[in-house]
Image: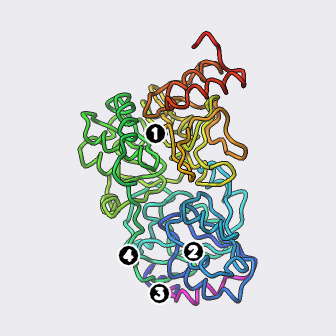
Amino acid sequence: MDYQKLYQEKLTTAENAVKVIKSGDWVDYGWCTNHPVALDKALAARKDELTDVKVRGGVTMWMPEICKAEDAGDHFTWHAWHMTGVDRKIAAKGMGYFIPLRYSELPRLYRENVSVDVAMLQVTPMDQYGNFNFSVAASHLADMLEKAKVVIVEVNASLPWVNGLTGSEINIRDVDFVVEGDNPPMAQLGGGGEPTEVDQAVANLIVPEIPNGACLQLGIGGMPNTIGAMIAQSDLKDLGVHTEMYVDAFVDIANAGKITGKHKSLDKGRQVFAFGAGTQKLYDYVNRNPEVMSAPVDYTNDVHVISQLDNFISINNAVDVDLFGQVNAESAGLKHISGTGGQLDFVMGAYLSKGGKSFICLSSTMTGKDGQLKSRIVPTLTQGTIVTDPRSAAHYLVTEHGMVNLKGASTWERAEKIISIAHPDFREELIAQAEKIGIWRRSNR
């Protein structure tokens, strides 16, 4: 087949391609670094011609053009599978909403539960076999594009080509329109700044718990990033990677010679992830690197897959934790912050892994808007707070004041353990609250 001829036949401008979008359509922007740029701008220019266009995206790294106008909400509604600061700003305009899910379910949701009129996203340039690569975000994109009635790809030569076994490419035969964008650089995501003393204290507790040959999953944020930096500087060896999100810390660990993947029972020698975002260092590292593999999220985040990887170590953040061991990692009361993502899947999968451990880490306190120090360990989660990990799933909880294992612990034992890692200034009040709730034994005092 003459793929180049087919490419030229489908090549058009962004302005022409978005003419297929009608009022009332569901339009998909893909995921994170794959959100369109030229096509988004062209669709925004059609604002006054359209009403009730419903757009989906996730882990949004820049403000979409369709959301910038004052009256944008009269024409477009934004739906996020996972929210960032950008998504929260869109929601604050009254035109953005979150779609609750476990991230591992997303491919199935496209296959069975949602409709897609038009899908448009950034991809790499086409190869000699007619394939466009999804770069660092295989995620759910293959299922999304298969469901779409119209597929528009926006070619960006800045995107790295990432190897994958399945679900990482689309062929020109399955594309309706090709648009050549202006090749903007990949969106950058930093590591969260210099580690704090709290970050270092938490990392010092977790890193000794990691054995040689362990398989790693790191969440995003200062603490996981600090832990990754300490792993890179440690004596650990022959580590593996199987994670939802690939971040700069993994590049540092790999460049330090700590990652071989030789003990992985699945995808031996490969660092596997659903999507990635970081600095240019990350994008350069993954480009056509045979040691990394981008895979659909219903594989990377599948509890049964995770459980087959021995000594699986899952490290994630939390917003707050209550005395029952319920973990909130996605809201501040009724204010939505992010999403469930894959945290619950990795918490469960790590515990099912032979020798596996899941760590939920957080600072013991935060400073409120009123300047007052507040405990992140609370008697009960406040009204409207989302439970990301139920108390039955929680394994290790870690703050700068210690680490506790909640498995097998009764309600009073949990309360005692959790209070022991709270900030000392709040422990007496937490004990008093635990007594009121009926989960405290006076003999513990």
Q: Can residue 302 be spotted in the picture? A: no
Q: Residue 55 at x, y = what percent?
A: 65, 71
- According to the picture, the residue beneath numbered tag 4 turns out to be 157
Q: Are marks 3 and 1 in contact (CB under 8 Å)?
A: no
Q: Residue 186 at x, y = what percent?
A: 40, 69
- According to the picture, the residue beneath numbered tag 2 turns out to be 120
Q: Is residue 258 left or right of residue 389?
A: left
- How crowded is the residue under tag 1: few (<14 C-alpha within 10 Å), some, or many (20+)? many
Rounded to the nearest angstrom, the CA distance separating label 4 from label 3 is: 17 Å
**Magenta includes 12?**
yes
Of labels 2 and 3, earlier in sequence is 3
- According to the picture, the residue beneath numbered tag 3 turns out to be 8
Which region of the structure is painted magenta?
11-23
Of labels 3 and 1, earlier in sequence is 3
- Quadrant of the frame with the C terminus: top right
Mark 3 belongs to which amino acid? Gln
- According to the picture, the residue beneath numbered tag 1 turns out to be 315
Number of the front mark, 4 or 3: 4
Of labels 1 and 2, earlier in sequence is 2
